[in-house]
Amino acid sequence: MANLAHETKAIYVISYRELRKFIRERSRILGTMARPILWLFVVGGGMSRLVRPVGGVNYIQFIFPGMIGMTILFASIFSAISIVWDREFGFLKEILVAPISRLSVVVGKAMAGTSISMLQVLILLIFVPVLGIRINVPQFLLLFLSSGMLAFSLTCFGILVASRMSSYEGFNIIMNFLVMPMFFLSGAMYPVKLMPPVLRDMAYANPLTYGVDGLKNILLAGASGTTMGPEYPAITDFIVVAGFLVVTAVLANLSFRRAA
Amino acid sequence: MSNITVNSLVKKFGAVTAVDGISFSVEPGEVFGFLGPNGAGKSTTISILCTLLGPTSGDASVGGFDCVRDADAVRRSIGIIFQDPTLDNGLTAYENLLFHAYLYGMDRAKAKKRIEDALELVGLSARKNELVRKFSGGMKRRLEIARGILNYPRVLFMDEPTIGLDPQTRNMIWEFIRELKKNTGITVFMTTHYLEEAEFCDRIAIIDLGKIIASGTPSELKAGLNGDTLNLSAMDPKGLDAEIRGKFGMDPKITDGGITLTVKQGDEILPALIKGLSTKITSVSMTRPTLNDVFLSLTGKNIREENGDPYGPMRSYARKNHGGH
């Protein structure tokens, strides 16, 4: 029991450290929040002149779930990549020689990525009333839960990638060949069913598609059945994201244990 | 019971044998030093003792616990100061120590007390709420020492503890280790390639190419050499040479303006020599053997002295690659 308390404390302090640093660096908060806001109002605002509202949903409203997904994706992967940064600067050694299990290190890092993501999601949700989207309290809680699941699984995915990276140099490759394609092929910007077949198949294989679709099920439920609405039943989204979470969590642990 | 026991330890990285069958033990309360040039296998040995690396073969135990089978117990009983800095520059001094305290399972009250004490001890209390980023190399090192002793370890590992530090900070750290040893009876295992640092150790092992080639107290090791070097200058070196050979049966070498000879107990022989010689001597000097002479006589090479700033490359790297985020 004492051991469990010790491991819990370690998980807490590992995630606290990241959150503390995130909050301390104001420029980082501004930088990370600028991206979705820019997409939402500059890209979304422009495109909404081109795309007619369908099923009572205009284009800005349509991409809002995708912007939440994007925010989670970037925040989670970026947070997980800090493992590479810690290794580069030696701090990882401080963690690795401590009398705590590797599992706690991974869980701590995953919790860090999740909390930083959720903090940003909460800031984004300020725009819900501005965009004319109405949600009630149960929907809000559901939204919070789905975002949390997505954030946790994507951070684990990031840890899996990070534990295989030997240096920070690979970061751009990860961003351009993994993170950006995941974002564009997730139905965040355009409905997956309208994509060309090859891209559509890739989008179907992308777990983020189901994460974003789950958010659409909550935020754009009124447009169900139209091109602007969610494509799958909520339960399908839930099962895929939950499955992705379990798989990435297990793989992240195995991979980190091997690399460390 | 020994605090560190190592038996026929081998560590191979592919075809390279970094540690080649070393055995040694360190007694409680001892300051034990590993002296050798870069790449001799010092850091690899420390990594194995700290459970960061598994050995290829052989046994290692720390505090009575096996480094492989009982890694968690080893980790609980040690403190480590790594060769390269391992602080989080984005946290304050206090936060760095708090992180460590929680990783070692302390509760808030205990952590707070120990952190205040440790900061006091290394003279950083006044700057505890400053970001480590703003600290000098010496301050960072002191903070790492405070962190290393936070969990009251039985064995403190220090990998090149004073590398790249100015002489003043170096002395301060040595003073600190001596105090720590006196007050807590802690066992210290350290690696170094600084000779003057090795002189501070109770016992040292000289390591080269993964093997221990000699061990003992610094004076024992030096006593194993031929002895002290005496230099005598004279107007007539040849005459002096002849007189010493004749009267004392010694074998000096003639140098530019004098002679040099190697003797045991040079401090006792020198006065007798001067008393008994009639050739006019203009100056005398005596050099005691250094650990470098020991290393030189065993390996035929010098331990290279290096003055690197370990924080320098990291800092420039940070500027280059991390400035953008």
Image (cartoon, rainbow, N blue to C red):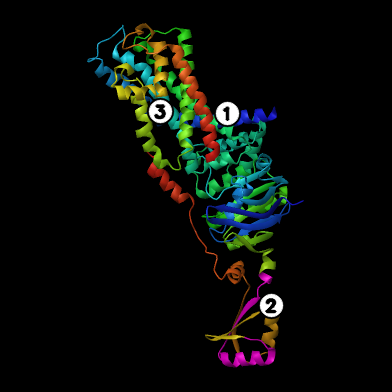
Amino acid type, callout 1: Tyr
Residue at image position (33%, 22%) is A200
Across and down, in percent, residue B96 comes to 56, 38
Residue that label 3 marks: A74
Q: For residue A210, which quarter of the picture? A: top left
In the rendered view, tell whether residue B117 sits above or below residue B296: above
Residue at image position (42%, 15%) is A214
Q: Is residue B229 magenta?
A: yes
Amino acid type, callout 2: Lys
Q: For residue B7, which quarter of the picture? A: bottom right
Extent of the magenta region: B222-251
Across and down, in percent, residue B191 comes to 60, 55
In the rendered view, tell whether residue A247 sits above or below residue B51: above
Residue that label 2 marks: B264
Q: Are marks 3 and 1 on the same chain?
A: yes
Across and down, in percent, residue A15 comes to 53, 29
Q: Are marks 2 and 3 on the same chain?
A: no
Residue A141 relative to residue B35: left or right: left
Q: Is residue B89 visible?
A: no
- Front tag of 2 and 3: 3
Tell which subunit mark 1 falls on. A
Element type at marker 2? loop
Tell which subunit mark 2 falls on. B
Element type at marker 3? helix
Q: CA distance from mark 2 to mark 3?
A: 71 Å
For the C terminus of chain B, which image quadrant?
Answer: top left
Q: Residues within 10 Å of mark 2 (few under 14, many from 20)?
A: some
Residue that label 1 marks: A12
